[in-house]
Amino acid sequence: MTFSIIGTGNMAYFLAEELSAAGHKFIGIWGRNTLAANKIAIQYPTLVYSSLQDIKDEEEHYCFIAIKDTAIAEIAAQLNFKHTTLIHTAGASPLQLLGNQTKHTGIFWPIYSIVADNLKTIKDIPIAIQGNNPQTENAILDLAKSITDKAFIANEEQRTHLHLAAVFANNFSNHLMAIAQEICIKQHLSFDYLKPIVEQTFERLKTKPAKNLQTGPAIRDDKMTMQKHIDLLKSNPEWALLYQSLSNSIRKMYSSSEE
């Protein structure tokens, strides 16, 4: 199979790396930032398209729109394929953004935090896919299976809820780590002291549901400790509100499960 990419960000690097490693031929890239497109084209030898209309329209060719969600519809509206399958890579955006002027459309969403300068060929990255018809969907699924052992079909409702869950599990947890680091820095403490307990948390998730692993003052309803923590956060009221909100959420989850 052959593929082309629209976009020059982290996802573009991921697609170029993973699909090329799987034996698919990278035949072209387009991006508003020509310098960035040239950089990818040199690293993964391919053609830089001078315009979107240069992208090939042929059987078993896949064109990936790997750009910010708000620009997908604008770019898709400029394309019209009879044979090429047009795919976007946004987890929270609907298939309908790709329009109706192209015969084969789909979604290819790797559920992974992708960083261009730290790419690895990992066969267990889950990839959620969707197609505008069963034939296209199965073809995209086969393409995904060529780079991962965990490709699966997800409808729009499933995918958007999975994206929401990923924000909680990845983006929000990372923000909490950033707050923890800031607290340590202000007290001249090394964040390394917390790394074993953080690693323990994620290690335990491999064998047990998160709901069964909750510890801390909120689940114990330790009001004295929680108030002490909130007092320590007076100089950062937004962190105090976050602490209170999360503590309330924990208490509500476990009080409901006990009823």
Image (spheres, helix red, strand yellow):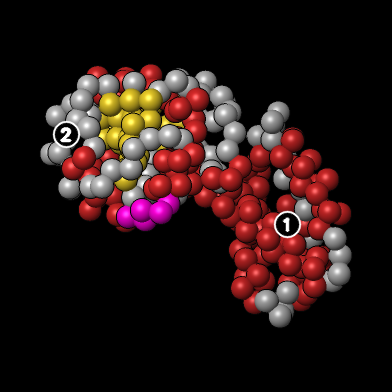
| Badge 1: residue crowd in 10 Å (few <14, some 14–19, many ≥20) | many
Front residue of 129/8: it is 8
Q: Going by the image, does 248 lie left or right of 43?
A: right
Left or right: residue 10 versus residue 60 is: right
Decide which of tag 1 and tag 2 comes sooner along the chain: 2
- Residue kind at label 2, given as amino acid type: Phe
Q: Quadrant of residue 107?
A: top left
Residue 249 percent across, percent down from the top left: 61, 56
The residue wearing badge 2 is 81
Residue drawn at point x = 28 percent, y = 26 percent: 61
Q: How would you classify the magenta stretch by its main secondary structure?
A: helix
Q: Residue at x 84, y 54 (%)?
A: 192
Residue 48 drawn at (x, y percent): 33, 42
1 in relation to 237, above or below: above
In the image, residue 93 lies in the stretch drawn in magenta: no
Disc number for residue 218: 1
Q: Secondary structure at mark 1?
A: helix
Quarter the N terminus occupies: top left
Q: Three-letter amino acid code at disc 1?
A: Ala
Q: What segment carries the magenta color?
A: 32-36
The quarter of the image holding the C terminus is top right
Report the label total. 2
Q: Position of residue 210 (x, y in %)?
A: 66, 39
Farthest residue, direction bottom? 235
